[in-house]
Each structure stands twice: as structure tokens, then as C-alpha cells.
Image: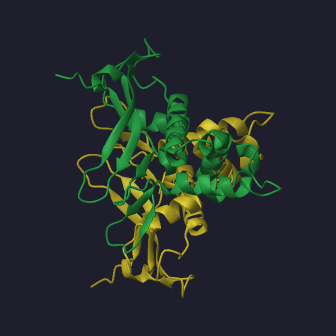
Chain colours: A green, B yellow
């Protein structure tokens, strides 16, 4: 369902197409969220990709959107900050236009945080969650939609990737608000 | 890189993010295109999905865009036909808005064809090809981009899926127009 930044850009129609693949009386499990890397020196947003000689950014699109906002914010005359998606849209780059609009709307909170890239990826997570909840519906059948949201953390070799869960709910046509299951992720201490 | 209809909706930024995963001196091979199903009774655009009791449409999004165009065309006052993407855009369904705009621009040719759904999927193919050529670049290295485009044909059980090749080129920064390799797909008769 995704696209750059982990946003479910397939939209309402894409969700319908996807959910109509569910077998009769079947359920849906959707894992969603953006990702961020940590380099071997502990730097957020940097990753040494397999077969490459230099580190590159991850999530490249979210970090590029933030860089574009920083550059635009520093200019006397803004090129896109403050403009709506419809106004600043590049049709050959519609997903990045969306990310730039959303990061731009949260720019002051991100830029003022003690760890801007940590704030950035959690704001990006919220954008993904909002968009996921905007596009789902229960028209495909009586089954539940189980949503697991969070931030995927790409770790440097030889460590395995991690996932920070931020959302875990079972929703249905009868209970579209859903049942919160996040407590299942909490460490019981036993 | 895709989204509904097989269009590379990740755009310029998504292509850059994707292509920067290429190993040093590596090449890129991209298979692209829309898909259309054939039902067991030979009907275009219909498919019996595994675990389901009734046939559904495939490609659902392209066929839904065409249905929306047919419905809008039949109305005295058009709701979206003739409007630009920017005007008719639904931000929660941006990809389908794009498909509706593109199918709408080709509506007369599709509707007037002897096999409208065959014409539809080949017009959709052209939209995908145009968008693919709009978003690629050679900034990731010296490697080639090999593009294979066509229409994926989902066949009814027990037949295997088919692929109708329509584009096969090797492009590079030195030769962005590319070398046409389509003749490799032609049956030699031997």
C-alpha cells in the first residue's frame, strides 16, 4: 500500500483493491510506519547499504523533505513552505510533494526538538498513521483490520533491524474505533 | 516503485531513493506495466481470486477509473472530466485521481474502440511508460537502466500468467535515448 516515507499512498481506491483480495470471512493485518537508520557510529538517519562504499540517508525521502524545508525556511522568499499540497504539487513527484507539505507543517516542532531527526521520524510516523486511518474501510467483508504501527529502525551490520511499536488495534465494521492492544507490547517484568 | 495501475507513483524522489540502493558499478532492471485479467469464460478484466466466491475486476483501479469516466461522461454536468489533476485531486485518493484524469483524457479513443477494455489497458500502459520515462535519472552511477514494459495478463486457473512485452530498452547516462532491444522478443520462426 505504501510509497516513499511509508505513507499508504495507494489511497482509498488502493485500499479497496487490496482489501478485496481478502478471502471470504478473512481478516487483514497491516504493518505500517516509516523507517530510520542508525549508522555504525550511532548517527541517526545514516546507513551503509550493501555493496556501497559510502553511507547514504534512510529514510532518504523523509530526510530529503526535511532538508528541503530547512533550505526553504532559510530563504527570505519561501518557495513551498506555507503552501497547500494542491498549490506546491509536482505531478512527477507527488509523494515527495506530500511529504514536504506535511514535514513543513511540523517544521517548528521538529527543528526546535533536542534531537530533530528523532522528532522528524515520529512526526512522519503520525503522518503515516493519520493517512492509514483516512484510507481504510470495512466494505470488503466482516473480517477485522488489525493495524500495527511504528517506526522501523534499520541497524548497522551485524545487528538485526528493530521496530518501535506505537499503535496496535483491532478494528471492525462494528467497532471502527477499535480495541487497543498496545499493552501486549509492554514488558511485564517477569 | 509502483502503486495502483502499475504507475511509478514514487516519482522522481522515489526513483532516486530506489536507485541509490544499486551497488557501486551496478545496473538497474525495471519491469513495468499495468495488468489485466481474463476470466475462465474469456471475459477481459474479470478474475476469480483465490478463496473468493465471485469474480472481481482486475486491474480494479484502471477499470474503476474507466467506469467513473463512463458515468461522468453520461451526465449533463461533468464532475471531473476535462478538469486537470490539480483541480480534481482527492488527497486521500491521489493515485486514483491521476488515473481518472489520464483515462479521461483518452476516453473517446477507448470508448470508440471495438474492444474498449483492450484499448483501455493499452492506454493505461502508455500512461505507465510515460510516467516511468519522466521519473528516471542516471545520477546513481555509471550503470545502465534496462526497462522492460508491457501488460501483465492474469490467466484463469490452471493457466500461468502471461506478459505482453511492449518496450525493451537499455538506457544510460551516455545514451539516455537507449538501445532498442524489442527484436529479442520476436519469434524467429526457427
Q: Is residue B56 visible?
A: no
**In the depicted structure, whether residue A175 falls above or below residue B107:** above
Farthest bottom residue?
A: B174
Q: Position of residue A150 (x, y in %)?
A: 40, 36
Which residue shows up at 34% across the image and 79% down it? Answer: B187
**Location of residue A152 (image quadrant):** top left
Q: Looking at this view, name the residue that lies furthest to the left.
A: A190
Q: Nearer the viewer, residue A177 or A48?
A: A48
Expressed as whole percent of the image width and height from the top left, the position of residue A91 reads: 67, 55
- Where A48 falls versus A112 (above or below)? below
Q: Quarter of the image containing the C terminus of chain B? A: bottom left
- Residue in view at x 80 percent, y 33 percent: B76
Residue B39 left/right relative to A11: left
In the displayed structure, does residue B38 sit left or right of residue A5? left
Residue in the picture at 46% in, 23% down: A139
Q: Nearer the viewer, residue A51 or B157?
A: A51
Position of residue A76 relative to residue B27, above or below, is: above
- Quick one: which residue is furthest to the top in this view? A174
* Residue in the picture at 53% in, 75% down: B139
Q: How many numbered badges does the structure rendering display?
A: 0
Quick one: which residue is furthest to the right in this view?
A77
Q: Position of residue A33 (x, y in %)?
A: 44, 40
Picture coordinates of residue A137, whole percent (x, y): 49, 25
Q: Is residue A9 visible?
A: yes
Q: Nearer the viewer, residue B126 or A148?
A: A148
Amino acid at each position: 500500500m505504501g510509497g516513499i516515507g511509508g505513507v499508504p499512498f495507494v489511497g482509498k481506491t488502493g485500499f479497496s483493491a487490496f482489501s478485496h483480495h481478502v478471502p471470504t470471512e478473512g481478516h487483514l493485518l497491516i504493518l505500517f510506519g516509516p523507517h530510520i537508520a542508525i549508522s555504525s557510529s550511532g548517527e541517526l538517519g545514516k546507513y551503509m547499504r550493501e555493496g556501497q562504499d559510502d553511507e547514504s540517508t534512510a529514510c532518504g525521502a523523509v530526510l530529503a523533505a526535511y532538508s528541503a524545508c530547512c533550505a526553504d525556511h532559510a530563504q527570505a522568499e519561501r518557495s513551498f513552505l506555507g503552501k497547500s499540497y494542491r498549490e506546491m504539487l509536482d505531478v512527477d513527484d507527488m509523494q515527495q510533494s506530500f511529504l514536504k507539505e506535511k514535514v513543513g507543517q511540523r517544521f517548528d516542532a521538529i527543528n526546535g526538538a533536542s534531537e530533530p531527526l528523532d522528532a522528524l521520524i515520529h512526526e512522519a510516523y503520525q503522518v503515516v498513521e493519520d493517512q492509514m486511518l483516512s484510507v481504510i474501510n470495512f466494505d470488503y467483508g466482516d473480517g477485522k483490520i488489525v493495524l500495527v504501527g511504528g517506526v522501523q529502525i534499520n541497524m548497522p551490520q551485524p545487528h538485526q533491524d528493530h521496530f518501535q511499536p506505537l499503535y496496535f488495534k483491532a478494528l471492525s465494521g462494528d467497532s471502527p474505533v477499535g480495541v487497543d492492544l498496545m499493552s501486549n507490547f509492554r514488558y511485564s517484568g517477569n
